[in-house]
Image (cartoon, rainbow, N blue to C red):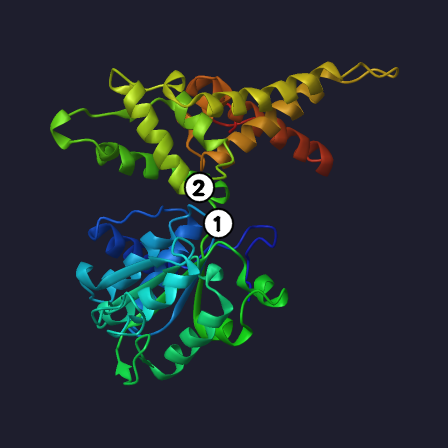
Amino acid sequence: MMSQGSDPHEAPQPAASSLAIHEEALADLERLGLVIGRSRAMRQVATLIRQVAAFPTTTVLLQGESGTGKEVIAYAIHALSGGSERQFVAINCAAIPETLLETELFGVEAGAYTDARLTRDGYLARADGGTLFLDEIASMPLVLQSKLLRFLETRTFRRVGGTSEIQVRLRVISASNVDLATAVARREFREDLFYRLKVFTIQIPPLREHPEDIAPLVEYFLRRQGGQPAEEGRSLRLSPEALALLERYSWPGNVRELRSVVQHGQIMCEGDEIRVEHLPAYLQSASSGALQRLLELKDQLHLPPEGVNLEEFLAEIEQRFVQEALERCNYNQVRAAALLGLSRDQLRYRLTRAGAQHSWRRRQSTGSPQARPSSGRTPT
């Protein structure tokens, strides 16, 4: 419901209590040394992590593109559930050959086959009391999917070649960069297993959908010194121009790619500021390619026979670019100005001018007399 007196065109704002819950969830993760971002989308992900962590045996499905941090989120769920690092067992279903995946998952009894001289536990037994993380679950063979389904329903399993049932108590978190519903429709994934895995689903957005998180993630990676020894003692920062370049890149490799770019910049930088020239060449060329397309569009512009109101036309283009830069930088004026090649004062002048023009046009359209500011200040 809309409250009385509210503007029907104004975007709905989250309740203060909802924001407080999101912030508490983020604080929980940051206490564990985990940073996933502070955008609205990632605050909601943090809240979901915190909620499902209260149910330590609930099965969770993480869906998102490669590199979005699914294993980090899986570990966050595990850690907030009170688990220890020793009990977080991760297995990449795509990295293990089909012939070995079953024995790696369930274990093997001595004598099950020629080379099985000893009884060996699998990942399920090792994760007892904690969390089993099954990454790239869509790569699991259909035959093995049926055995995993049986385990999820009974919480018991048999080692390969064994006859006795082994019971464990653990949480299963699976992850996929393939849409499992689509895989089910193509008969590439079992429908019954899909519904058993998606008891609680968390959809992780790609980095390009929340570029405002790039700055805090870069800060986090730089604080960790990009994996380099802490004794180097360098305190690095990113220049506004370099950050602007990162924020307008599309990030097909998501957070994993961002971390690699930060490490590359750290290696190339000899001072205390990572600049554009320290970033990988493909990033610089991707940016120049987009700029080249804009310049080509400029070459296609020609004055129409009837002429044009040049001042209004250029003002509209400028206003559109300023607004887009502000939105992309989460309304941080310093970063937006860097994105546009302006100083902060130049950007603020344009914002003031655009506000005055908008106010004048609104008065003209309503027929109201043009009021003179009583204070003598420029209206903003």
Q: Is residue 222 above or below residue 289?
A: below
What percent of the width, then of the height, locates residue 19? 37, 56
Q: Quote the CA–CA distance across marks 2 and 1.
A: 8 Å
* Res 135 → quadrant: bottom left
What percent of the width, then of the height, locates residue 326? 49, 32
What percent of the width, then of the height, locates residue 26? 30, 53
What percent of the width, then of the height, locates residue 164? 27, 85
Q: Which residue lies furthest to the left in this view?
A: 231
Side of 131 relative to 16 (left or right): left
Side of 96 relative to 248 (left or right): left
What's under tag 2, amino acid-wise? Asn
Check contact, mark 2 vs mark 1: CB within 8 A. Answer: yes
Q: In this view, does 316 lie above or below 208?
A: above
What's under tag 1, amino acid-wise? Glu
Q: Is residue 323 above or below residue 99?
A: above
Q: Residue furthest right?
A: 305
Residue placed most toward the observer, 294 or 363? 294
Mark 2 lies on residue:
254
Mark 1 secondary-structure assignment: loop
Mark 1 lies on residue:
65
